Amino acid sequence: MRPDGRMRPDGFAARFGSPPDVRAEARGRVNLIGEHTDYSGGFVLPAAIPLRCRVSLARRPGKRVRLFSDDRETDGVLEYALGEETAGRGWIDHVQGITRVLAERGDALGGFDVSVASEVPLGSGLASSAALEVSVLRALRDAFRLPLDDVALAKTARRAENEFVGAPVGIMDPMAASLAPEGAALFLDTRSLAHETVPIPEGAEIGVIDSGLPHEHARGGYRTRRAEVEEATRRLGVRELRDLSGEDPEAVARRLPEPLSRRVRHVLTENRRVLEALAALRASDLVRMGTLVREAHRSLADDFEVSTPEVELLVSLADRRQGVYGARLTGGGFGGSVLLLAARGAARAAADAVARDYRALSGRVATVLLPMASE
Ligand code: GLA
């Protein structure tokens, strides 16, 4: 835990009448490549972003949990009792899910007060939920001396999402929030959970533009895609699509009807692209990395069909900009954010120009989230 001078003062003492015992934080992530591969045992390559979720927490006697979010001040202080978690209460479901899963794991927890302040925008494809869950789990680990290593912590967050919040997401986001260091990417094998830090090459800079169209994981398209992947896996007679990594993606696709064939082709080719991207990053080959980013986007848009007309416009505008190696939809899709892999020093101007042209062409407002204006 870091009672860290850089953190802005939060509303904890004002809300709860005394200072917190612990503070913790976790970052959002941007996925460089490896999309919709983390629930079939595949590879991903997310990177931590400077936007963070911060929490302050204090133990309290009894079983009550009191929660306050700076971002939803009008909600005031919300409450529930440990052991009486009830889904359907908005953002506190992420915390209720955590305490439920910790209890199931046998971790001894008492009541607590917690306040949250997040810079990670909701619904932008930057893993705001994982940043919230991992920061709360870090604070709980510290406050109650829980025997959770960083991987167990990520698994707990994922279970809370899957089993309590009801979002059928994979392990990428909590692993990135728990393990990706600042300024580096995390290569992760989502089957074995083997992971490795990969520095972002000196000459590269990441830009992120939020399309302003929020996605929704708990229902809708993400759930449908996940069900399609499960159906294809069943028809192919394997445990996970990862089992087919040695095979020709086109040949595997031919064994399935539409649209399952294209869904599987995306996943199998995407896993290959992640491995190639890893090699390109290690070799600081940004031109190759940019090509892979563009190919990943086409596959995500055409085969996996998770893009939108607005995202297509942003990506095509970004691909044309000076200093941009490649651009693509990042995160689960159906809206969310676009990633720009740019030359160092070029990302902000490129992203600003894309947002300006996008507004002129579509009348919609896209927000440049990274690099931050002061970076
Ligand atoms: C969301 C999910 C992740 C992953 C991505 C798509 O971010 O939370 O588990 O499936 O979508 O790659």
Image: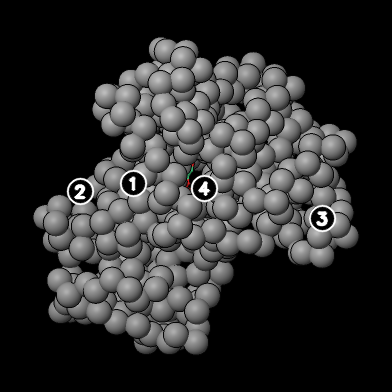
- For marks 4 and 1 on the same chain, the one whose residue lies earlier in the sequence: 1
Q: Which mark is residue 332?
A: 4
Q: Earlier in the sequence, mark 2 or mark 1?
A: 2
Indicate which label's residue lies in the foreground, 3 or 2. Answer: 3
**Residue 206 appears in which quarter of the rendering?**
top right
Please, what is the three-letter code of the amino acid marked with disc 2? Pro
Between label 2 and label 4, give the one nearer the viewer.
4
The mark nearer the N terminus, 3 or 4, is 4
Tag 1's secondary structure? Answer: helix
Asked if 331 appears above or below 261 in the picture, the reply is below
On whether ligand 1 comes within 8 Å of the CB at mark 4, the answer is: yes
- What residue is at 33 percent from the left and 62 percent from the top? 165
Residue 58: % across, % down: 31, 72
Residues at circles 1 and 3 in contact by the CB criterion of under 8 Å? no
Of residues 359 and 119, the one drawn nearer to the viewer in this rendering: 359
> Do the CB atoms of the residues marked 3 and 4 lie less than 8 Å apart?
no
**Which mark is nearer the camera, 2 or 1?**
1
Amino acid on which the number 4 mark rests in the picture: Gly
SS of the residue at dot 2? Answer: loop
The earlier-in-sequence mark between 1 and 3 is: 1
At mark 3, the secondary structure is helix
Q: Which residue bears the numbered disc 2? A: 147
User: Considering only vertical position in the picture, is 220 above or below 186?
Assistant: below
What residue is pinned by disc 1? 154
Q: Quadrant of residue 190?
A: top left
Q: Nearer the viewer, residue 40 or 200?
A: 40
Residue ID for mark 3? 358
Q: Is residue 271 visible?
A: no
